[in-house]
Image (spheres, rainbow, N blue to C red):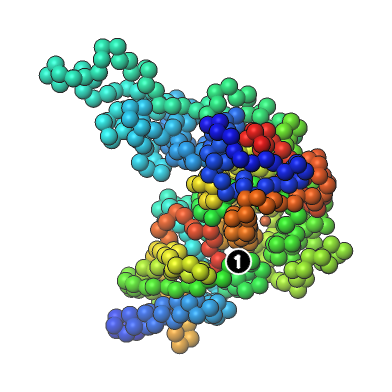
Amino acid sequence: MTDDPRLLRYEVEELFFAYVECLDEGEVERWPDFFTDDCLYKIISRENFERGLPLGAMLCEGKGGLKDRVVSVTTTSVYHDRALRHLLSNIRVKGVANGVIDVQANYAVLETLTNEFTTVFNAGKYLDKLVREGDGLKFKEKLCVFDSVMVPTSLIFPI
Amino acid sequence: MNESLPYKWPEEGNSRIPYWVYSDPRVYEREQERVFGGASYSFVALEADIPNPGDFKRTKIGDRPVVVVRDTDGGVNVLVNRCAHRGSRYCYREHGNAKEFTCPYHQWTYDLTGALISVPFRRGVKKQGGMPDDFRLEDHHLEALKCALRGGVVFASFDHTMPAFEDYLGPKMLGYFDRVFDGRELSILGYSRQRMRANWKLMFENLKDPYHASLLHVFLVSFGLFRADNPSQVQMDEKTGMHSVQVSRRGEQKASEGTREMRQFDQGLRLHNPEMLQPVPEFPGDATVVMQTIWPNLIVQQQSNTLAMRQIQTLGPEVFELHWTFFGYADDDDGMTMRRLRQANLMGPAGFVSIDDSEVMEAAQFGLGKYPDAEAVVEMGGRGVEDQDHMVTESSIRAFYDHYRNVMGF
Ligand SMILES: [Fe+2]
């Protein structure tokens, strides 16, 4: 683990930027590579999160859970074409303890359906736990807490 | 509103659905009045949403805002969210706990049963103004709806002459309802909401249409959760056909006579986390899926161990919202709670199964919305409205429209 906070911040930002680039470029098959094998991934509304209710809109337990979501997106689900783009801001290292790096960041996902204007599809914050694995950082836990209680139509791709 | 509409239902009857019912604002207005505002019980809350005195939540019946609140005696009241003074919305928060409701506009204050308890400056200020001498607080109650509670579920009606909820459902549908709401205390796992660019009736049709489930839902079909060749039933209530259930039993992931026509069937599909689809039997009988639709706004979902209320709220002829409440039982152990949360991946805005439905309902609206004079052909399983012991039918859609036409005067 590096002791230089500037270097750590650089590494964390690189991970986040590569992560959203993977999703925005439509390479969802590579999405599980950003996580540890025993990861937890959850998209949860702010409403449920703040009320202490456990239900997530999307819940993946371990890399297997992520891969099942990939199968759904690429094989079984039926949906309209769209382009998605993540905007990231305020990526902050909140603390480092026992090899786990707590990171919080804001995100907005823009959605563009065929023949429609671009809209803000989903916005919220990531509350993540990162660990060092091999030569880089991976998500051990990724929690996407989205602000609006309302999802326009459906939430198909991971955030 | 009795303005006559320039439409006539197709001569074929219930085996046709004219597309003007999905887009015309006048039809929508009549629905608000007769379907949601008329002789019906709408789902408004689970008692577990508001367990303590003073707990409240806002919701809507059709598009009309109401507040569901537990009073100090433990009773449940459903009150229109409209001040009795000048009509302002008095309840500003989506949920919370209150001792009383005060409308911020002129601070008229109501107790938790909706009774008006104080009006500022009622006697005037310095002998000027004030309410007339014959103004009585008890004449200005918040509009309260007729309430029905059963098994921890709260229903409400604008029509105070409604029969008991049990008679409204009928014995057959009540049996399916009591199967899930068997008196055990419920616990809330969380909420989800979606806004769909489609007419609300398409949601009901979707749940009354086992024909599509075997074809559209690759996920369900491939993993044997719901298939045309599984033993199954479609049943309606005895009197009207307005309520229905789809009952199914889980099959295997194998090819059969039926799967040849299911073009999407993928025998080789495997889950990396198969425990997501390993249910534990918890209800009497051998059914693994029971989807019940209760007129005019509720779907009770029991798919394996994932339980949810799906409430329909309308926003206009071509927009509706689906408000999901996922729940379990207060006596569930951690394993069962985890199982319910895991299987919740099938349903909701990001559901492996329900994504298909949401997208397809919008596709339907995009297809039929601008062709009010065309019509749907609903002849799978015949042209009647009777119960059937298979999935290859649209009979409960026909039964739904049989009742709809009576209510709407079509
Ligand atoms: Fe479906």
Does residue B321 appear left or right of residue B84 in this picture?
right
Local crowd size for mark 1, using a 10 Å CA cut-off: few (<14), some (14–19), many (≥20):
some
Which SS class for mark 1? loop
**Outermost residue to the bottom:** A135
Residue B303, x across and y down, in percent: 67, 52
Does residue B149 appear left or right of residue B275 in this picture?
left
Residue at image coords 51%, 69%: A115
Q: In this orientation, does residue A21 appear?
A: yes
Residue at image coords 86%, 65%: B256
Q: Look at label 1 and name its amino acid.
A: Tyr
Residue B189, x across and y down, in percent: 53, 50
Q: Is residue B335 above or below residue B115?
A: below
Chain on which label 1 sits: A
Q: Is residue B289 above or below residue B101?
A: below
- To which quarter of the image does residue B14 belong? top right
**Outermost residue to the front:** B6
Does residue B201 appear left or right of residue A3 in this picture?
right
Q: In this orientation, does residue B46 appear?
A: no
